[in-house]
Image (cartoon, helix red, strand yellow):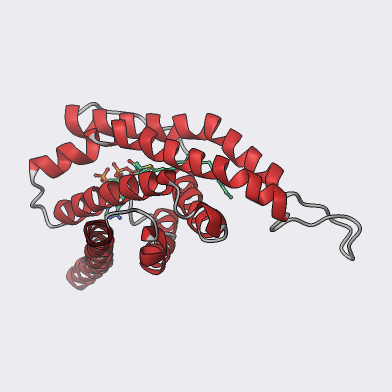
Amino acid sequence: MASTEEDGSVEEKENNNKKRTKSAIAVAWLTFYNIAMTAGWLVLAMAMMRFYIQKGTHKGLYKSIARTLKFFQTIALVEVVHCAIGIVRTSVIVTGVQVCSRIFMVWFITNSIKQIQNEESVILFLAVWTFTEITRYSFYTFNLLNHLPYFIKWARYNMFIIMYPLGVAGELLTIYTALPYVRKTGMLSMRLPNKYNVSFDYYYFLVIVMLSYIPLFPQLYFHMLRQRRKVLLGEIIVEKDE
Ligand SMILES: CCCCCCCCCCCCC/C=C/C(=O)SCCNC(=O)CCNC(=O)[C@H](O)C(C)(C)COP(=O)(O)OP(=O)(O)OC[C@H]1O[C@@H](n2cnc3c(N)ncnc32)[C@H](O)[C@@H]1OP(=O)(O)O
């Protein structure tokens, strides 16, 4: 009997140790990931400022930072995996929409349509994303290390109130500016007849993407407002299953 109790407690201890090890691995990975992403976006911020100070214009800025931007924004797909495997308590859908819309902006708009890369709207969303990501990733890092300065927490849950609409305005203006080029070149479109018997018009696809901001953006914004109430004001919010 004694030996069974002992075995039981050994088993329990092992299970607890496994759980602890698993969460320690998750915490270690997230800490590494958030530090790397903070550093990546800081490098982008410095590269943008240096470019502007040296050249005195925003023309050519996108091209100069494109590779780093594509790298760090694409890596963010990992965040959808974090949610899916449950190591962060965030909705896969909310994170998926946020990350995919950014990747779409980078790869299928700004990177693919050279003529719009020098638009002010591109600089607008780049500046907003950069500020937001430095704040967000440093918030997660300090939070994981249990040393969160209040001003970072404050910035994470207040600055988005202005930054989110500004970023979205930059993105929508950029897509809008791209429309004439897309129509003129017929890029990424498939016209009939073709061997697959499929027709796809990228121009109308972009119009649909722009319209989809109307139902989707408020959901992201209200999600952040709920997070703000929870974290800054300590409100208990019962989330629906997503
Ligand atoms: C095919 C084409 C499709 C196109 C579709 C188009 C439609 C698009 C419509 C909308 C487009 C929006 C475009 C975006 C523009 C911009 O970004 S503009 C710049 C301003 N942006 C922001 O302010 C971004 C705000 N958004 C976010 O912060 C996130 O992306 C979020 C997913 C929307 C919300 O984050 P969330 O994780 O839910 O909230 P938090 O409070 O930060 O975290 C919740 C808990 O999760 C923990 N956590 C999350 N991530 C991490 C991590 N990396 N490391 C560690 N921990 C993490 C966090 O600590 C919280 O945990 P608890 O404290 O335990 O609750």
Q: Would you place residue 186 above or below residue 224 in this image?
A: below
- Would you say 177 lies left or right of 139 here? right
* Residue 152 seen in this snapshot: yes
For residue 84, side relative to residue 209 (left or right): left
Question: Dividing the image into 4 quarters, which one contains the N terminus?
Answer: bottom left
Q: Is residue 69 above or below residue 174?
A: below
Residue 220, position as x, y percentages in the image: 42, 36
**Quadrant location of ligand 1?**
top left
Q: Is residue 119 left or right of residue 25?
A: right
The quarter of the picture where residue 13 lies is bottom left
Which residue does the image show at 74% across and 55% down from the upper left?
189
177 and 168: which is toward the camera: 177
Q: Nearer the viewer, residue 78 or 38?
A: 38
What is the quadrant of residue 128 in the picture?
top left
Which residue is more in the foreground, 97 or 88? 97
* Furthest residue toward front: 56
Residue 75 visible from this viewpoint: no
> Picture coordinates of residue 207 (x, y %)?
64, 39
15 sits left or right of 182 in the view = left
